[in-house]
Image: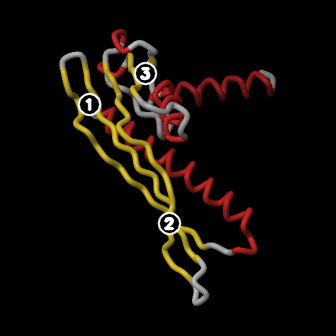
Protein backbone atom coordinates (compact mmCIF):
# COMPACT_ATOMS: atom_id res chain seq x y z
CA UNK A 1 0.00 0.00 0.00
CA UNK A 2 1.29 3.43 -0.86
CA UNK A 3 1.56 6.34 1.52
CA UNK A 4 -1.39 8.12 -0.18
CA UNK A 5 -3.63 5.04 0.15
CA UNK A 6 -2.68 4.70 3.80
CA UNK A 7 -3.66 8.33 4.48
CA UNK A 8 -6.98 7.89 2.66
CA UNK A 9 -7.77 4.78 4.71
CA UNK A 10 -6.88 6.57 7.93
CA UNK A 11 -9.11 9.53 7.00
CA UNK A 12 -11.99 7.18 6.17
CA UNK A 13 -11.64 5.35 9.50
CA UNK A 14 -11.49 8.67 11.37
CA UNK A 15 -14.65 9.98 9.67
CA UNK A 16 -16.50 6.73 10.33
CA UNK A 17 -15.46 6.76 13.99
CA UNK A 18 -16.55 10.36 14.52
CA UNK A 19 -19.88 9.74 12.76
CA UNK A 20 -20.52 6.57 14.78
CA UNK A 21 -19.99 8.24 18.15
CA UNK A 22 -22.73 10.83 17.55
CA UNK A 23 -20.39 13.77 17.10
CA UNK A 24 -22.19 17.04 16.36
CA UNK A 25 -20.62 20.45 15.74
CA UNK A 26 -20.78 22.67 18.81
CA UNK A 27 -23.33 25.45 18.64
CA UNK A 28 -25.60 23.67 16.16
CA UNK A 29 -28.80 22.56 17.86
CA UNK A 30 -31.16 20.46 15.77
CA UNK A 31 -34.58 22.06 15.51
CA UNK A 32 -37.62 20.03 16.57
CA UNK A 33 -40.08 18.94 13.91
CA UNK A 34 -42.47 21.81 14.74
CA UNK A 35 -39.73 24.31 13.75
CA UNK A 36 -38.83 22.64 10.43
CA UNK A 37 -40.59 25.35 8.35
CA UNK A 38 -40.28 28.65 10.20
CA UNK A 39 -41.59 32.11 9.47
CA UNK A 40 -39.66 34.90 11.19
CA UNK A 41 -42.01 37.80 11.91
CA UNK A 42 -40.08 41.01 12.60
CA UNK A 43 -40.05 44.71 11.85
CA UNK A 44 -36.40 44.92 10.83
CA UNK A 45 -34.65 41.94 9.26
CA UNK A 46 -31.29 43.69 8.93
CA UNK A 47 -30.17 43.81 12.54
CA UNK A 48 -27.06 41.91 13.58
CA UNK A 49 -29.11 39.56 15.76
CA UNK A 50 -31.59 38.67 13.03
CA UNK A 51 -28.92 38.17 10.37
CA UNK A 52 -27.10 35.68 12.61
CA UNK A 53 -30.40 34.11 13.74
CA UNK A 54 -31.57 33.37 10.20
CA UNK A 55 -28.25 31.76 9.28
CA UNK A 56 -28.25 29.70 12.48
CA UNK A 57 -31.83 28.51 11.96
CA UNK A 58 -30.97 27.29 8.48
CA UNK A 59 -27.77 25.64 9.73
CA UNK A 60 -29.77 23.77 12.38
CA UNK A 61 -32.15 22.27 9.85
CA UNK A 62 -35.01 24.78 9.72
CA UNK A 63 -36.35 26.02 6.41
CA UNK A 64 -37.23 29.71 6.45
CA UNK A 65 -40.33 30.71 4.53
CA UNK A 66 -41.50 34.11 3.34
CA UNK A 67 -45.18 33.18 3.76
CA UNK A 68 -46.65 32.85 7.22
CA UNK A 69 -49.33 30.41 6.02
CA UNK A 70 -46.66 27.94 4.79
CA UNK A 71 -44.93 27.77 8.19
CA UNK A 72 -45.26 25.12 10.87
CA UNK A 73 -44.08 27.71 13.42
CA UNK A 74 -43.81 31.49 13.62
CA UNK A 75 -40.90 33.05 15.46
CA UNK A 76 -42.01 36.58 16.34
CA UNK A 77 -39.29 39.05 17.20
CA UNK A 78 -41.06 41.49 19.52
CA UNK A 79 -38.05 43.73 20.15
CA UNK A 80 -34.44 43.89 19.01
CA UNK A 81 -32.52 46.75 20.64
CA UNK A 82 -28.93 47.61 21.33
CA UNK A 83 -27.18 50.57 22.88
CA UNK A 84 -24.66 51.71 25.42
CA UNK A 85 -24.59 53.36 28.84
CA UNK A 86 -21.86 55.24 30.66
CA UNK A 87 -20.58 53.20 33.61
CA UNK A 88 -17.97 55.55 35.01
CA UNK A 89 -16.54 59.03 34.43
CA UNK A 90 -13.21 60.67 35.21
CA UNK A 91 -12.63 63.64 37.51
CA UNK A 92 -13.01 65.86 34.39
CA UNK A 93 -16.46 64.32 33.84
CA UNK A 94 -15.48 62.44 30.68
CA UNK A 95 -16.56 58.81 30.21
CA UNK A 96 -13.93 56.22 31.08
CA UNK A 97 -16.03 53.08 30.89
CA UNK A 98 -19.10 52.08 28.89
CA UNK A 99 -21.52 49.18 28.99
CA UNK A 100 -22.84 47.81 25.69
CA UNK A 101 -26.17 46.01 25.90
CA UNK A 102 -28.27 43.94 23.51
CA UNK A 103 -31.88 43.06 24.29
CA UNK A 104 -34.23 40.84 22.31
CA UNK A 105 -37.74 39.68 23.05
CA UNK A 106 -39.30 36.81 21.12
CA UNK A 107 -42.21 34.40 21.16
CA UNK A 108 -43.04 31.26 19.18
CA UNK A 109 -46.42 30.17 17.90
CA UNK A 110 -47.35 26.97 16.12
CA UNK A 111 -50.38 26.13 14.04
CA UNK A 112 -52.25 25.08 17.19
CA UNK A 113 -51.30 28.10 19.33
CA UNK A 114 -48.55 29.49 21.49
CA UNK A 115 -45.49 27.25 21.87
CA UNK A 116 -43.27 29.63 23.79
CA UNK A 117 -44.55 32.72 25.61
CA UNK A 118 -42.72 36.04 25.17
CA UNK A 119 -39.15 35.79 26.45
CA UNK A 120 -36.91 38.80 27.03
CA UNK A 121 -33.14 38.32 26.98
CA UNK A 122 -30.50 40.95 27.74
CA UNK A 123 -26.74 40.56 27.59
CA UNK A 124 -24.17 43.20 28.51
CA UNK A 125 -20.43 43.74 28.18
CA UNK A 126 -18.36 46.64 29.40
CA UNK A 127 -15.23 48.22 28.02
CA UNK A 128 -12.89 51.02 28.99
CA UNK A 129 -12.88 54.20 26.95
CA UNK A 130 -9.93 56.37 25.93
CA UNK A 131 -10.33 59.52 23.83
CA UNK A 132 -6.87 59.05 22.29
CA UNK A 133 -7.93 55.69 20.83
CA UNK A 134 -11.35 56.75 19.59
CA UNK A 135 -11.36 54.70 16.37
CA UNK A 136 -10.10 51.59 18.12
CA UNK A 137 -12.73 51.93 20.85
CA UNK A 138 -15.51 52.36 18.28
CA UNK A 139 -14.35 49.15 16.61
CA UNK A 140 -14.21 47.42 20.00
CA UNK A 141 -17.82 48.46 20.65
CA UNK A 142 -18.86 47.08 17.25
CA UNK A 143 -17.12 43.77 17.95
CA UNK A 144 -18.83 43.54 21.34
CA UNK A 145 -22.26 44.12 19.75
CA UNK A 146 -21.61 41.36 17.21
CA UNK A 147 -20.52 38.98 19.98
CA UNK A 148 -23.61 39.80 22.04
CA UNK A 149 -25.84 39.12 19.02
CA UNK A 150 -24.16 35.73 18.45
CA UNK A 151 -24.51 34.83 22.14
CA UNK A 152 -28.20 35.77 22.11
CA UNK A 153 -28.79 33.65 19.01
CA UNK A 154 -27.22 30.69 20.81
CA UNK A 155 -29.57 31.14 23.77
CA UNK A 156 -32.61 31.48 21.49
CA UNK A 157 -31.67 28.36 19.51
CA UNK A 158 -31.27 26.30 22.68
CA UNK A 159 -34.74 27.41 23.82
CA UNK A 160 -36.22 26.59 20.42
CA UNK A 161 -34.52 23.18 20.39
CA UNK A 162 -36.21 22.33 23.70
CA UNK A 163 -39.73 22.70 22.23
Vertical order, 98 against 150 (above or below):
below
First reached walking from the N terminus: tag 2 or tag 3: 3
Q: Residues within 10 Å of mark 2 (few under 14, many from 20)?
A: some
Residue occupying the point 61% across, 59% down: 141
First reached walking from the N terminus: tag 3 or tag 1: 3
Residue occupying the point 41% across, 33% down: 29
Q: Position of residue 3 (x, y in %)?
A: 80, 27
Relative placement, left or right, of 95 versus 113 is right
Describe the element under mark 3 as helix, strand or loop. Answer: loop
Q: Which mark is residue 62?
A: 3
Q: Residues within 10 Å of mark 1 (few under 14, many from 20)?
A: few
Q: Position of residue 73 (x, y in %)?
A: 31, 20
Quadrant of residue 134 in the image?
bottom right
Quadrant of residue 133 in the image?
bottom right
Q: Residue furthest top?
A: 70
Viewer-closest of 93 and 10: 93
Vertical order, 65 against 40 (above or below):
above
Relative placement, left or right, of 84 versus 129 is left
Q: Position of residue 10 (x, y in %)?
A: 66, 29
Residue occupying the point 75% across, 21% down: 5
Describe the element under mark 2 as helix, strand or loop. Answer: strand
First reached walking from the N terminus: tag 2 or tag 1: 2
Check the picture and name the quadrant holding the N terminus: top right
Closest to the camera, between mark 2 and mark 1, is 2
Describe the element under mark 1 as helix, strand or loop. Answer: loop
Relative placement, left or right, of 19 versus 137 is left
Q: Position of residue 74 (x, y in %)?
A: 33, 23
Amino acid sequence: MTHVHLRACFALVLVATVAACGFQRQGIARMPEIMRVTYVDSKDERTEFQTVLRRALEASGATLTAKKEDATATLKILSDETGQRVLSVSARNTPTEYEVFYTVEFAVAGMSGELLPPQKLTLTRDYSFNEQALLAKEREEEILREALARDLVGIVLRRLASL
